[in-house]
Amino acid sequence: IKTIGILTSGGDAPGMNAAIRAVTRSAIYNGFTVKGIYRGYDGLINDEIKTFSTENVSGIIGTGGTMLKTARSKEFMTEEGRQKAFETIQKEEIDALVVIGGNGSLTGAMNFAREFDICCIGLPGTIDNDLYGTDNTIGYDTTMNTIVECVDRIRDTAQSHERIFFIEVMGRDAGFLAQNSAIASGAEAAIIPEDSTDVDQLAQFMERGIRKSKKSCIVIVSESPKCGALYYADRVRKEFPEFDVRVSILGHLQRGGRPSARDRILASRTGCGAIEAIMQGQRNVMIGVRNNEVVYVPLSEAIRSDKPFDRKLIKVLDELSI
Ligand code: F6P
């Protein structure tokens, strides 16, 4: 392997730039040529590629977003798209591909690797923390801190007006962001996909909260197309008209901002890990960190949808929200 291509794909996550920097610098340090691929898999299909030197990644460790740009490529999901991408790989003489992204992006890398027998290495880049086999993903810690800062602010106004707030956070199908940010912000409850909290449980919680004379409260709701924060707020308004209810959907502000030290370190360790893996002859693995050790997780495992969720976290929040 002489030349390594690198791309970011899917939703951007704080720390992706730190990962791009780490892969680029570690590759150059170890004698490889690095090619930056712009706009995710679309850039691979359309040959939007530039050879990187160490200067290309200067001053980016602390910046949010991704300097390589990103996309959710529809074309790469088709056989023709992947064929075109492979033609670019041949033309650019890329021998291995490092893909920084979440579930969909690593699924794409796995299929591509299988079809064209190419070495693909994944880095876990998503705020959702839903990749299997790594304790944390790049971006998760920063986003959790962003959410906690927002909730702290909302609590000021919630308490002043004695209101109930439903705050909706991202996470796609996973409740890691919602549950842990609820614990960290001292919220009264979290509604997450991993728990089957239905609206009756919510109503019980409401009554309990009132008996304990809490006049304002914060409920963190994991995003869901059918029953997000607006849905719960509506139900409470109907069933408990005495409460003053407000909704705040945090949206994409959760994806931006300077990466935390933790995310920068995770990105740097896994970025160097990707190059080490290539040098060891590893193929088609995601580089994760488990119990503080860098680990190789087969891509087919990394994309599993059943990352363990520690149910004790639900108890912790329950006990502390009395
Ligand atoms: O996967 C990251 C994520 O931010 C999810 O939490 C969210 O559901 C989704 O991406 C939003 O995607 P988009 O930015 O394409 O609307």
Image (cartoon, helix red, strand yellow):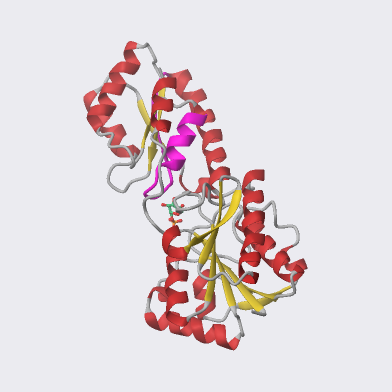
Q: Position of residue 91 (x, y in %)?
A: 58, 88
In the shown orientation, is residue 269 left or right of residue 244?
A: right
Q: Is residue 23 visible?
A: yes
Q: Position of residue 72 (x, y in %)?
A: 45, 66
Q: Is residue 86 magenta?
A: no
Which residues fall within the magenta stretch? 162-184
Q: The N terminus lies in which quarter of the figure? A: bottom right
Residue drawn at point x = 43 percent, y = 32 percent: 313
Residue at the extreme front of the image, as rendered:
280
Instruction: Determine whether 134 is above or below 118 in the image.
Output: above
Please state the horizontal and vertical placement of residue 308, each as a whole percent of the image. 40, 45
Give the residue displayed 70% in from the left and 54% down from the top: 61
Image region (quadrant) for ligand 1: bottom left
Q: Is residue 158 left or right of residue 198?
A: right
Please count the marks in the image. Answer: 0
Q: Residue at image x 47%, y 75%?
A: 113
- Confirm whether residue 249 shows in the render: no
Q: Quadrant of residue 178?
A: top left
Figure check: 231 above or below 88: above
Picture coordinates of residue 176, whole percent (x, y): 44, 42
Is 175 magenta? The answer is yes
Q: Residue at x 47, y 63 (%)?
A: 298
Examine the rendered structure and indicate whether residue 4 appears above or below residue 20.
below
Horizontally, residue 18 falls left or right of residue 232, namely right
